[in-house]
Amino acid sequence: MINVLIYGIGGKMGANVLAALADQEGIQAVCGVDKYVPDTVKVPVYSSAADVKEKVDVVIDFSRAETIDDILAFAKKTRCALVLATTGYSSDQQAKIDEMSKLVPVFQASNFSLGINLLIDLAKKAADVLGLAYDVEIVEAHHNMKVDAPSGTAMTIAKEIAGEYEGGKEFVYGRHETNKRRSVNEMGIHAIRGGTIVGKHDVMFIGKDEVITIAHEAQSRMVFAVGAVRAAKFVAGKTPGKYTMSMMLAQ
């Protein structure tokens, strides 16, 4: 049995991960960490991972970037695996995560949806076929409570597509700070925030007289929770290192 600590168990994603775990065999939630504890949560919840008493094999994190030090300290002490679904890390925080992957298995992704990862594969293929004759623009939309912008998923999509072009692409965020014509090497990245949008990403390839759009919209947070649980089962017991969605989906 794989024992899971849900970091951010009191949030919306924490509730979805808890529900997703209940539908799986061979894996279970044994505790959580959060400042807020809903009455519906039936496992122990702590304010810090340092207080956790249960044996934990994997931490699934859907919290905020500032909690990473607490998570990494727990991983260093227990040598548990990490599934990091939080985005918006600073370069220093990411460096700490990369260093921790030398001690424990770290599964990190900006988006745990199978559909998003298919979108990335299709967009890379489109970039390879269409080349510089088509401009590339990415538009992402999320709920009004999301902190980071552009989304981590949009940045992952952009970096993956840029890798298909010799010399890469210059990322332009919005265009309100510039007043010039678009260059052929630009890739525009735009963020929308409002209401309760779970997550929507459109990749547009814009050529002469036609536009090709590859789009994905998550209609429920459960798609991310199911992916994270699948990642936890994949990474549990692995050797130290960095693990990704593409590695998991290749098996």
Image (cartoon, helix red, strand yellow):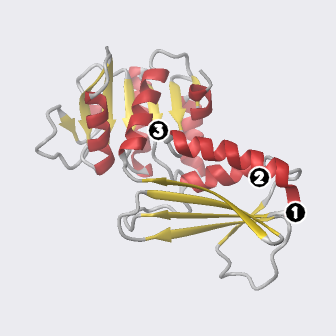
Left or right: residue 211 versus residue 34 is right
Binning the other alpha carbons within 10 Å of mark 1 as few (below 14), some (14 to 19) or many (20 upward) gives few
Q: Earlier in the sequence, mark 3 or mark 1?
A: 3
Residue 226, image x and y in percent?
A: 39, 35
Relative to residue 25, is residue 169 depicted above or below?
below
Residue 242 appearing in the image: no
Q: Quadrant of residue 131?
A: bottom right
Q: Nearer the viewer, mark 3 or mark 1?
A: 1
Q: Name the foreground residue: 95 vs 178.
A: 178
Element marked by disc 1: helix
Residue, disc 1: 133
Mark 2 and mark 3: span between their CA atoms? 24 Å
Q: Name the foreground residue: 19 vs 169.
A: 19
Residue, disc 3: 84
Q: Earlier in the sequence, mark 2 or mark 3?
A: 3
User: Which residue: 32% across, 16% down?
Assistant: 26
Q: Are marks 2 and 3 in contact (CB under 8 Å)?
A: no
Q: Quadrant of the C terminus?
A: top right
Binning the other alpha carbons within 10 Å of mark 2 as few (below 14), some (14 to 19) or many (20 upward) gives many
Element marked by disc 3: strand
User: Which residue: 37% across, 48% down?
Assistant: 221
Q: Nearer the viewer, mark 2 or mark 3?
A: 2
User: Which residue: 46% across, 38% down?
Assistant: 84
Residue 12, image x and y in percent?
A: 29, 50
Residue 228, image x and y in percent?
A: 43, 35
Residue 22, image x and y in percent?
A: 25, 29
Q: Amino acid at mark 2?
A: Ala
Relative to residue 213, is residue 100 depicted above or below?
above
Q: Amino acid at mark 1?
A: Ala
Q: Name the foreground residue: 22 vs 2.
A: 22
Residue, disc 2: 162
Q: Amino acid at mark 3?
A: Leu
